[in-house]
Image: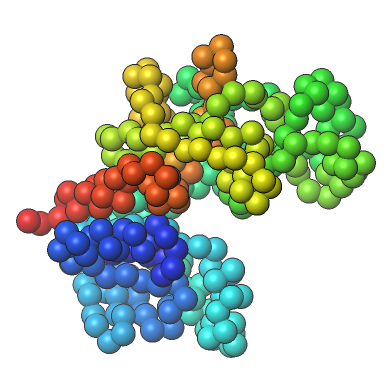
Amino acid sequence: MLWGISGDPAFDSLRRELRGRGVPQVALDQRQVRRARFELDTCDGLAGRLELDGDVIDIDEIGAIFVRPFDIRQVVRESADLASSAEGRDEAVTLQQRLFAWTEISDVVVLNRPSAMASNCSKPYQAELIRRSGFEIPPTLVTTTPDDARDFIARYDRVIYKSVSDSRSMVSRVGATELAAIQDVANCPTQFQARIAGTDWRVHVVGDDVYACEIECEADDYRCAEEQGFALEIRSAPLPEPIAARCHGLAHSLNLPLAGIDLRRTVDDEWYCFEVNPAPAFTYYEQETGQPLAAAVAQLLSAGLPS
């Protein structure tokens, strides 16, 4: 089963890949949850069923689950059907809660379980887990105290700031404009990090396979390079074996069979790790490099299915 939103490139790419392999699948689109019912019974083992557009599927018939749901509150706000009534909103939230419970306790292959994905909800917490794996992490400050922020910025000179949670934010350098508004950190915990000079790498761990690409870009956040007028080149590149093994170990220590790991390599060959994404947008890198990421994810999902 695939759970997410149609139109999301990773979701759609995986559907096409599974279809091309002849793998039976059911896709649950979050925006169409009013057409779905899900019942879960844990009183005597684990039982349940999914009803979608009149078709009834016993959960015992589902041998693998791909989990890539968006924030249900955002989905509801952007869906006229769901936002039009309190009943629709309640149905969407209830279904999501039940599905999360099922994907957490199911004994089939799940990419990825909610409890494992949760480490990304707190960047400082995840950074500590990353540090334990052997990677360097940048000097970091999370604060609501303007004076502490000023001291940190003065100490490290080049500093960036970004989200503390899993909410997507653009990594930005602290400049004169940000310093003038530094009092605003009193209203929201803000994460500051010393800017590490070097070359970005994105590593995807898919089961036991490791796919690496090197990124050449002068922007502070290469994801926003084009809109900021920076050149961007992403290419497949061999990862040093000790670093590949460390990435594999990190992903599996976080119980993430599928992970996107953000690294930076310095000129002194030090490897810093910024984040482990538990729901990576792998199609972006696949399109740039030709790496068979959707195929690898499809293979991992289908490996445990009956032949």
- Residue 248 versus residue 31 in the image, above or below: above
| 120 horizontally vs 294: left or right | right
Indicate the quadrant where residue 172 lies: top right
Indicate the quadrant where residue 192 lies: top right
Indicate the quadrant where residue 176 lies: top right
Using the rendered image of the protein, determine whether residue 203 is visible from the camera's viewpoint. Answer: no
- Residue 161 versus residue 129 in the image, above or below: below
| 269 horizontally vs 210: left or right | right
| Closer to the camera in the image, 110 or 211 | 211
Question: Quadrant location of the C terminus?
Answer: bottom left
> Which residue is pictured at 64% across the width and 41% down the height?
230
| 158 horizontally vs 44: left or right | right
Question: Quadrant location of the N terminus?
Answer: bottom left
> Which residue is pictured at 82% across the width and 28% down the height?
153
> Which residue is pictured at 59% across the width and 75% down the height?
78
- Residue 103 versus residue 54 in the image, above or below: above
> Which residue is pictured at 78% across the width and 48% down the height?
188
| Closer to the camera in the image, 205 or 21 | 21
Residue 3 position within the rendered picture, expressed as x and y whole percent measured from the top left:
37, 65
| 172 horizontally vs 137: left or right | right
Q: Number of numbered discs present? A: 0
Q: How is the image coloured?
A: rainbow
The extreme left residue here reads: 307
Residue 219 position within the rendered picture, expressed as x and y whole percent measured from the top left:
65, 37
Residue 90 position within the rendered picture, expressed as x and y whole percent measured from the top left:
53, 79
Residue 46 position within the rendered picture, expressed as x and y whole percent measured from the top left:
25, 63
